[in-house]
Image (cartoon, rainbow, N blue to C red):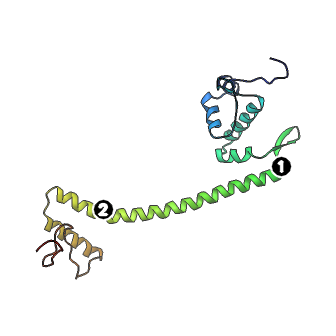
Amino acid sequence: MSKDSPTLLTVRDAAERLGVTPRTLKYYEERGLVSPTRSEGRYRLYDEDDLKRFGRILRLRSLGFSLHSVTEMLKRPLESVDGGHRYSTESLQQIHDAIEQQVAALDARIESVRRELKEAQKLRAELSPDLDYLKRRLAGENAEALLEQRRNARAKAGNATPSKQATEPDAPTPGVSTPGKSS
């Protein structure tokens, strides 16, 4: 190997050097944050630039940034400032805007899920008495007694109207013929 060719490290060696597990490196690759070169045998090989990128990812994660935020930050170049590297004001604004858009999209999604949850809870509340009735009927309880309990419960709740009579779902209403059936 010549002095001009870069040193390439295997996953195990790169992970050891960075103080992480090989799975961590593979995970960040799966997320599209790093793209190592591959050997002829398809093994991952990492160069110094890859290690610097991993170092940056690990520092940002240790500071509590989410992977989405880290992804946005990696899209922006660092500038040399006072012997170190920092984001320019323009880069920081772009990162801010991208993350703000993600948060707004998540807020909209949360609101949508809340509406769906409220609808699902309402439907569940409507179905629960029916399910209870059916369980009790299957357990052998008297249909007339159960229907009377349902009428009383509705009347107490203020939902019953005098003209409506609760009937068993599969039983015909007395005096009313059902098409295809005789009363």
Q: What residue lies at 68% left-to-right and 22% top-to-bottom?
A: 13
Image point (24%, 71%), residue name = 153
Residue drawn at x 62%, y 32% is 26
Q: Residue furthest right?
A: 82
> Whole-percent x and y of residue 67?
65, 44
Nearer-the-camera pick, 106 or 169 = 169
Depth check, front residue: 26 or 112: 26
Q: In which quadrant will I find the N terminus?
A: top right
Residue 88: mark: 1
Q: Tell me, yes or no, whether the two marked residues, 2 and 1, touch with CB atoms within 8 Å.
A: no
**Cα distance between the residues tagged 2 and 1:** 58 Å
Q: Mark yes or no: residue 172 visible.
A: yes
What mark, if any, has residue 42 been given in the picture? none
Q: Residue furthest left?
A: 183
Q: Which residue is mark 2?
A: 128
Quarter of the image that includes the C terminus: bottom left
Judge from the rendering whether residue 113 lies leftward or rightward of residue 77; answer left or right: left
The residue carrying pointer 2 sits among few (fewer than 14), some (14 to 19) or many (20 or more) residues within 10 Å by Cα, namely few
Q: How many marks?
A: 2
Q: Quadrant of residue 80?
A: top right
State the image quarter where residue 145 is shown: bottom left
Name the residue at 71% across, 23% down. 9
Q: Position of residue 79 (x, y in %)?
A: 85, 43
Decide which of tag 2 and tag 1 comes sooner along the chain: 1
Q: Quadrant of residue 109?
A: bottom right
Q: Looking at the image, is 134 positioned above or below residue 58?
A: below
Residue type, label 1: Ser
Q: Is residue 48 left or right of residue 100?
A: right
Identity of the amino acid at label 2?
Answer: Ser
Dot 1 lies on which element? loop
| Residue 121 screen position, x and y as percent | 40, 62
